[in-house]
Amino acid sequence: MKNEATGLQRLVNATRFSWQGFKAAYKSEEAFRQEVWLAILLLPLGLWLGDGAVERILLCGSVLLLMMVELLNSAVECVVDRFGPEWNKYSGRAKDMGSAAVFLAIALMLLTWALILLT
């Protein structure tokens, strides 16, 4: 039976695995690199421009949500690519759906920023 980490060691391991995921995404995904730099600009701006906690959470949260969706999309693409480079309608569909999710996250972020800052 496998010896599973518990307690603090589990938290340390999870943090290490998450950091490895961030590094892998930054290294291999152009869109994620762009979103990281966008977040470096927008997160402090969202904290500064938001009027109260709710607006700050919405502005910053929409940026972080975009990054989360991008990470999940990249994970789907990675798993699909692992099974081979040949075209498959289900593989294509999975990648297209991931891309659509990123598109919706971008739309949500833009809508959130526009409605909060322009109204």
Image (cartoon, helix red, strand yellow):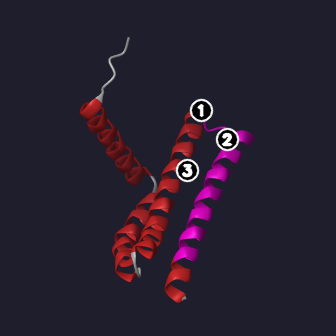
Q: What element carries label 3?
A: helix
Sequence order check, earlier mark of 2 and 1: 1
Name the one closer to the observer, 105 or 26. 105
Toward the bottom, the furthest residue is 119
Which residue matches tag 3? 73
Between tags 3 and 1, which lies in front?
A: 3
Sequence order check, earlier mark of 3 and 1: 3
Q: Is residue 69 magenta?
A: no
Sequence order check, earlier mark of 2 and 3: 3
Q: Which residue is found at the position 26% from the left and 37% from the top?
A: 12
Q: Can residue 81 be seen in this view?
A: yes
Spatial separation of the CA atoms under disc 2 and disc 3: 13 Å
Would you say the residues marked 2 and 1 are in contact, meaning their CB atoms lie under 8 Å apart?
A: yes
Residue 26 lies in what quarter of the image? Answer: bottom left
| Label 1 Cα crowd, 10 Å radius (few <14 / some 14-19 / many 20+) | few
Residue 94 lies in what quarter of the image? Answer: top right
Which residue matches tag 1? 83
Q: Which residue is found at the position 28% from the left and 31% from the top?
A: 7
Q: Is mark 2 on a helix, strand or loop?
A: helix
In the rendered view, does 54 fall on the left or right side of 89?
Answer: left
x, y (%) of residue 74? 52, 49
| Label 2 Cα crowd, 10 Å radius (few <14 / some 14-19 / many 20+) | some
- Residues shaded magenta: 84-112
